Image (cartoon, grey):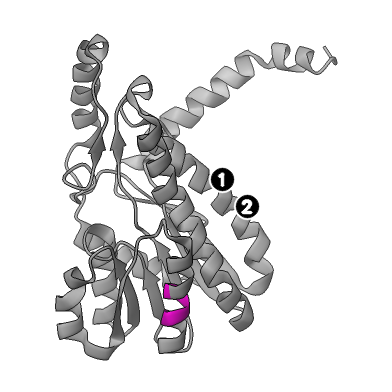
Amino acid sequence: MTKTWFITGASRGFGREWSIAALERGDSVAATARDAATLDDLVEKYGERVLPVELDVTDRDGVFAAVARAHERFGRLDVIVNNAGYGQFGLVEEISETEARDQIETNLFGALWVTQAALPFLREQRSGHILQVSSIGGISAFPLVGMYHASKWALEGISQSLAQEVAGFGIRVTLIEPGGFATDWAGSSARHATPLPAYDEFRAEAQRQRQQRVGTPGDPAASGRAVLAVVDAENPPLRIFFGDGPLAIATRDYESRLDEWRRWESVSVDAGGKG
């Protein structure tokens, strides 16, 4: 059975590749972007199966109108992809109030508004799959991108709660957690805080470590096959890594956390008055 997708941030990166993957197999896509003209080639190639929508996901009213328009056009919604977002670079002390709020507005609230707008339609049809594009940075954290981590850790928490809340309506939720990919995430779409000279030496070392950690970036086009496997699965995962690096990072991080919690367990118990 063909599916109808609603994909935010479809002008480039994962959003574009997943739109193409869906369209190539005969599905329909409501593709959103801040500039709808970036979707013209998709409309030219795939015709009526593409609904281009100009959308800023921080505009809640605009989001609800866009989702309703997509449902009216195609008659149903099967896959909701919250992909729109960007990376905010800067050490915690360097981040301005505007930068902090803008990061959360886009990466967290944008996904929340789309999810809220889609849920009434998914509940009514008692089916649907919400894909939240998180990151290895949604379960681990590194220097220079603390505000980005904050947005993705929050998305992870709200999505895990959501999965439990909507399971009874036949709605699935999957958090996709990519590692390093050759998208524009760290390029022109990224935003950078004004650097403080006191951190210059630390920043240089952190950037060097980041390059080592990322290694050879993954191919965004190849991820199209993976996302189709996820949405076609009878029992899709709540979380899935994209790329071959995240599992090693997560394993080291979680083993370190468990070890530390265990070493401090006596203090933890004492804090509850049961020691």
Location of residue 84 with respect to 28 vertically, above or below: above
Q: Main secondary structure of the magenta part?
A: helix
Most foreground residue, 168 or 158: 158
The span picked out in magenta is 66-70
* Residue at x 25% of width, y 39% of height: 191
Most foreground residue, 237 or 81: 81
Asked whether 92 falls inside the magenta stretch, the response is: no
Q: Residues within 10 Å of mark 1 (few under 14, many from 20)?
A: few
* Residue at x 52% of width, y 56% of height: 238
Q: Dividing the image into 4 quarters, which one contains the N terminus?
A: bottom left
Q: What residue is pinned by disc 2?
A: 161
221 left or right of 142 in image? left
Q: Residues within 10 Å of mark 2 (few under 14, many from 20)?
A: few
Location of residue 270 with respect to 218 vertically, above or below: above
- Amino acid on which the number 2 mark rests in the picture: Ser
Can you give x and y, in whole percent of width and height, for residue 20 in the image?
23, 73
Can you give x and y, in whole percent of width and height, for residue 41 in the image?
14, 77
- For label 1, the SS is helix
Q: What residue is pinned by disc 1?
A: 157
- Amino acid on which the number 1 mark rests in the picture: Gly
Most foreground residue, 77 or 61: 61
